[in-house]
Image (cartoon, grey):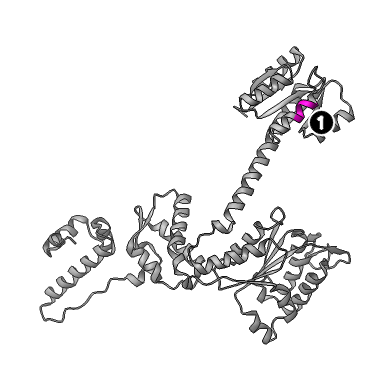
Amino acid sequence: MAGEKILIVDDEQGMRRLLDRVLSREGYETVAVAGGAEALRELNSGDVDLALVDIQMPGMTGLELLERIKEFDPCLPTIMITAYGTVESAVKALRAGAYHYITKPFETDEIKLTVAKAFERERLLAENRYLQQELAQRYSFAGIVSESLCMREVFEMASSVAVSNANVLITGESGTGKELMARSIHFNSARKEKPFVVLNCAALSEGVLESELFGHEKGAFTGAVGTRKGRFELAHEGTLFIDEVGEMSLNAQVKLLRVIQEQEFERVGGSRTIRANVRIVAATNKNLEDEVRAGRFREDLYYRLNVVNIHVPPLRERREDIEPLARHFMGKFAAEMGKAVTTLSPRTLSCLLAYDWPGNVRELQNAMERAVVMARGSAVTPRDLPQGLHGQDEICLKVPERGGSLTELLEDLECQLIIQTLRREEGSQTRAAEVLGIKRTTLRYKMEKYGLLERGE
C-alpha cells in the first residue's frame, strides 16, 4: 500500500482531517481538498490512485465530480461518502462507475477495509489487463517466430479464418506447432475474451473421452461422486481445441458430430439438454482422408471439421526458420535460467541446419533448453547440443598410411585429436583441455611439442 496516492474530497474540514489522518497512518500518500474544482486540478497535476468523494458538496456535487473523474480516467477507483445514504443516490453512484458507497457516520475500520479492497481489486484488474495484453502479443500472428515464405502463407490463411466462426482442421507432423496455431486463431477472433479449452483425444480412453467432452451427472457411473461440466460446456461462446482428433473412436465421433450439428448435448447420465455455442478447432498428425477411406473416421464428421484446412509444414521444409527459432529459444531459456548465453557458434549453427528435426519445433526447443543448461560461456557450442546433433560434428581420426613405430602413430593420432578438438571448441584451449581431460598447461606443452602454437591452432 505504501506510496499509493489517495485524493480526499469533502467540504467539511473535520472530515477531511479525519480521513487524512486515518489513511496516512495506513501508509498511503494523501491529499485533501474541499471541492470539485480543486479535485480536478489535483487530478491534472499529479498521479492519483484512488478518490474518496463526498456526495453532498456545494457547487459541484460528488456525483458530478464522479462523472468528470470517469471522463479523466475511467479506471480510477472512486469511493463515495455521504451522510444522506439513500438507495437512490447509492444506485446513481454505482451506475456512474463508483467502486463503493459508504454512509456517514462510519467506523474508521470500514474506511480502511474498503480502501484496501478497492486497491486489491484494481491490482487484479491491472494484472488481468496485463495478461490479456501478453496473450494478445504472444499469440499474434506477427509475433510468431518465422522467416519462411511457406509459414507466412499459413499465417495469412489463419488470420483470415480467425475473424470467422468457421471450424478449422489443422494438420501437420507432431511438434510443428499446431496448438500454437489454434491458440493464435482463438486470440485473434471475436471469441478471444471467452474460454480456450483443450481436449487431447490421444490421452483419454473412450469411456473417459465422452465424460470429458459432455460432462456427467452425479452417480452416472462408478466414481462419479458429483456433477461435472464437460469441455463443450466450459468452452461456451469460446473455442474448443480437439487435439489428435484422429484418435477418436467411431462411437465418440457420432456423438461429436451430433453436437456440431445441433449445438446441444446431454451430460453422461443426464437428460437435461444443454446448448453450447462453441467453435471447434481440431488438429491431427494423421491423414484423415486416408482414415476415411479405411473406415476409421467418419466422412461426414471430416467435412464438418475440415471447413478450413491449415497445414503446418515440418521444420525440415522451412529451414529458414531454424536459426531464428534457435536464437529465440536460446534467449528465452537463458533469461529463465539467469545465464549470460547470447550467441550460437558458427559450428553449432551448422549442426542445427544440417539436422532433419523429426520432432520439429518441439525437438528444437528441447535441444536449445539442454544447450543453455550445458553452456559454460556466452556461446552455445556443438558439445552443448544433444548427442544426436553434435554427433554430426564428431571428431574423426585417420590412421596414417605411412609406416612407423607404435609411438609415432600414437603421437600422430594425438596431434590430430588436439587439432580437431581445438577447432570444435573454436580455439578455446581451456575448453579443449576440459574435453580432453587434461590440464591446460599439459595441452600447451603438447601443442608446442607438435608445433601447433606456431601454426595458430
Of residues 267 and 235, which is closer to you in this image?
A: 235
Identify which residue is drawn at 71% across, 29% down. 115
The answer to whether one can see residue 382 in this image is: no
Of residues 42 and 302, which is closer to you in this image?
A: 42
Identify which residue is drawn at 64% across, 64% down. 160
Look at the image and say whether residue 66 sits in the magenta stretch: yes
Q: Position of residue 89 (x, y in %)?
A: 86, 28
Question: Exactly how many numbered labels are in the figure?
Answer: 1
Identify which residue is drawn at 17% across, 60% down. 456
Q: Position of residue 107 (x, y in %)?
A: 78, 22
Q: Is residue 166 above or below residue 402?
A: above
Position of 446 compared to 199: left or right? Answer: left
Q: Residues within 10 Å of mark 1 (few under 14, many from 20)?
A: many
Q: Residue furthest top?
A: 13
Q: Is residue 309 above or below residue 97?
A: below
Main SS category, magenta section: helix
Identify which residue is drawn at 54% across, 68% down. 176
Instruction: Look at the image and tell me in which quarter the N terminus lies.
Output: top right
Residue extent of the magenta highlight? 63-67
Residue bearing mark 1: 93
Position of 311 compared to 264: left or right? Answer: left
